[in-house]
Amino acid sequence: MKYNLSNKMSTVKFSAIRTMNNRLKGDDAISFAGGFPDPEAIPQETLKEFSKIVFDENTLEILKYGNAPGYTNLIESSKDFMNSIDEGTVKDSDDVLITTGSMQGLDIVSKLFINEGETMIVEDPSFLGAFNSFKCNGAVLHGVPLEDDGVNIDALEAAFSIKPTPKLFYIIPNFQNPSGVTTSLEKRKKIYELAKKYGVVILEDNPYGYLRTSGESLPSIKSMDTEGIVVYVASLSKIISPGMRIGLLVCDKEIYDKMKIVKSVNDNHTNLLSQYIMDRFLRTVDMDKHIHSLRDIYAKKCHFMLEMMETHFHPSITYVKPEGGMFIWAKLPDHVSMPEFVEAAIQRNVAIVPGNEFMVDTTAPCQYVRINFSTPSLEQIERGIKILGEVSYEYCGELVKS
Amino acid sequence: MKYNLSNKMSTVKFSAIRTMNNRLKGDDAISFAGGFPDPEAIPQETLKEFSKIVFDENTLEILKYGNAPGYTNLIESSKDFMNSIDEGTVKDSDDVLITTGSMQGLDIVSKLFINEGETMIVEDPSFLGAFNSFKCNGAVLHGVPLEDDGVNIDALEAAFSIKPTPKLFYIIPNFQNPSGVTTSLEKRKKIYELAKKYGVVILEDNPYGYLRTSGESLPSIKSMDTEGIVVYVASLSKIISPGMRIGLLVCDKEIYDKMKIVKSVNDNHTNLLSQYIMDRFLRTVDMDKHIHSLRDIYAKKCHFMLEMMETHFHPSITYVKPEGGMFIWAKLPDHVSMPEFVEAAIQRNVAIVPGNEFMVDTTAPCQYVRINFSTPSLEQIERGIKILGEVSYEYCGELVKS
C-alpha cells in the first residue's frame, strides 16, 4: 500500500549516528559517533542490588498502574538532587514530572506549545534528536548561530522579534551537543532577559550539566527564573543509566497540570521499577562522590583525546576545548571537503559524525565534525585519533604542501 | 506567566476516571471507574524472580542505551505469542515495534499519519485516552455509531467517503472500551473491505482480546490483511503487568522504518529491564495456561457482576453482556438524568464513569454509564452493585411508581 503520511514526517530523518555506526566492521572498528556513557560510569552492581530490594519491598506497587506525574518519592528525591547541584532549579512554585527519558520531555513541551507550522527558535547547531522531536510536533525551526560562549545575542533578539512571536527557545547551556559550547553567565542572563521581554518560553535542556570536567559550574537559566518562563529538562541517563529511561521535567505549577495530561497521553506513566530503583539511588548513594567519580572518568578521557588530537591532528584543524559533556566539535580548514574527510575516516573503520547533521539546514556547507570521547576506551581513543590524524594530514595538508 | 498553548491542547482533557476516583473517601469506597487488572491476575512472584535472573545475566545490556525498535529477542517472542493466539497477526511481511505501553503505539501512529486539522474516524463511544492521543497530534475526530455487533457499516462508509479521504480508522474489535461490544466476524470483513476500497489505514487496538471470558475467539482484522493496511496495537499490561509498560505495535515492513523513527523521537527506546523480563515471561511461562487462569479470574468477576446487576438493578436499565474485557456498559432509561445518577452513586461512595466521557461529543445527551468489574473484589462487587441498585430504584423507578 502507498501510505499517505503527515507532512511533518517528511522533515524528520533517521539519526546519522546509527547510520555511521552501522558502517563500521569488525573488532578493530572505532566509533566516535555515539554519545553513550562509558560502561565503567554505570554503577551496575548497585543498580542490580537496588532492583532486588525495591522489587521485594514494593512488588505490587511496581507492577500495577502508576500515576502520570511519577512515583511521589522520586519526584521529591529528584527535586533535592537537582537543587543540591544547582540551587534554585526547582522552586516552591515548581513541580517535577518524571518522563521516559528526557527525549520525552522535549516531546511533551513542544506538543503542548506548538501549532503545526509555527516557528521554534533553536541554537544552530544543536541536538538532532531534539530537532526531530520538535518537527514531529509540527514546528518549523529557526536557528540562531552559536558562538564560543553561547548564541549570538543580536541574532537571538532578531529571532524573538519574528511575528507572530515564537513560543519556545530550545537551549543546551552546558557542554552543548554537538558543539561542546558552554553558554557564559553573562549570556545566560541576557537570554533570560530577552525571553522575559518578548514572552518566549525557554526550554532548557541539561543532559550533560553534571558532567563538568574542568572550570567553574554556572547556574542554570531555570535557577534565575522568577516568572515561570523556563521549562527545565534533565536526565539520569548520563549519570546513572540510560537503559532505565528516567528523565526529569521541571516547570512552574501553573503549567504542570497540562504537562501531566500530555504525559499521560504519551505513555500513561513511566516504568515503575526504574522509578523505584532511581529513587533509592538518589536517596542512599553519596551523589556528590558519585558525580565526582564520573567527572574523573570523563575528564581523563576528554583530556587524553585533546592531547592525542594536539599530537596527531593537522594544525589547521581547530576546536574549542570543552569543559565537560561528551563531545569535541572540530572544524576542518575551508579548502577541505568535510563529507570526504568523514568518508575517508569510515573507510578506515573510524566513525565520526558530519557536522551538517546537527544544523537546522543540513544541506548548507559545513566544515565541522563531532567526535565523541565518552564511549571509546583510552586505547580506542589513541588508535582512532592516530587514524584521524593520518586522514587529516592527507586532506588538510594539501595547501601546505602545494 | 500567561502561557500561549497549542490549539490542540484546548480539546484534550483530564481523564474523568481519575476525577471520579479522587472523589471517593475512606475504606468503604468502591471504584467501578478504573480499568486496572485484578492484583490476583498479576504474576508477582514470577516477575520478581525473572527480574533478578535477567538483570544478573544481562546487567550491562540492560543498563546501556538500547535500540529504538526494541530488544530483538522480545520482538521475536512477542511475534510467536501473538500468532499463537491469533494466527496471521504477524506475517512475514510484518515487523514488531516494542512500545512504552500501547498508549505510545496510538501516539506513534497518529503522529505518523495526521496533519493538524485532518479528520480521523473512530468508533463512538471509544477509549478516551485514544481520543486524547489523536487530538494531541492534531486530529479532528469523526465518530461512527457503535451497535451491538460493531460499528454501523453504512455510517462507516459515509465517513470513509468524506473528502479528503480520512487516513485512519481506530477500532477496538474485542470487548470494546467502554461498550464491551465485540465486532462480529461479518462486520470485521466488511470493515476491512471498505478500508481497502477507500484506502483508509485501520488502527486495530487489542488490549483486551486475550481476556475472553465466554464465546468463540474471532480473528483480528490484522490477520485478514493482505495489503498492509492494518496497523495492530496490543499490550502486555492487561495480561502480565501494566507497571512494566510494554506494548506491541505490528505493521507492514514497508512502513516499519517510519514507525521506528517516531518511536526513537518519542523516548529513544523502551525500558530495557522490562523488555528482558517480558521476553523471559513469554518464553518460559506456559502462556496458554496463564491466559486461561486470567480468563477464569475475570469470567468469575464478570458473571458475578452480571448476576448481581440482574438481581439488584431496576429492570429498565439495559446492557449487553460482554464476552470479555473489563467493562459493562449500562443504559439508563430515557427519563433519568445520567449525570444525576452518577452523582448519586458517588455520594454513596461508589464511582462509575459517565458515558458521555467516551463520546466524540461529550456535551451531547447520553444515557450510558461504564462499570468496571476487573478491579474490585467480589465483596466490593456485591456491596457496590447493591448500592447502585438502590440508586437505580430511586431514579429509574419513578415512572413505574407514578
Image (cartoon, coloured by chain):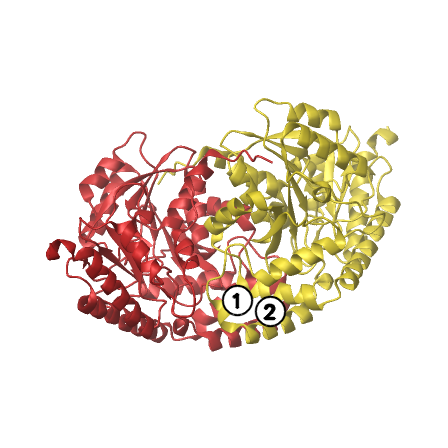
Chain colours: A red, B yellow
- Is residue B178 left or right of A22 when viewed as pictured? right
Q: Which label is found at residue A276?
A: 1
Q: Secondary structure at mark 1?
A: helix
- Is residue A304 left or right of A102 when viewed as pictured? left
Can residue A327 be seen here? The reply is yes
Question: Residue B72's quadrant in the figure?
Answer: bottom right
Question: Residue A380's quadrant in the figure?
Answer: bottom left
| Quadrant in the picture for the N terminus of chain A | top right
- Is residue B314 left or right of B243 when viewed as pictured? right
**Mark 2 highlights which residue?**
A58
Q: Check if mark 1's residue and mark 2's residue have beta carbons within 8 Å.
A: yes
Which chain contains the residue that carries disc 1?
Answer: A
Position of residue B230 measured from the top left corner of the image (x, y, whole percent): 65, 40
The residue depicted at 23 percent of the width and 64 percent of the height is A389
Q: Which label is found at residue A207?
A: none
The residue depicted at 70 percent of the width and 63 percent of the height is B42
Position of residue A398 measured from the top left corner of the image (x, y, whole percent): 16, 55
Q: Earlier in the sequence, mark 1 or mark 2?
A: 2
- Is residue B98 left or right of A245 when viewed as pictured? right
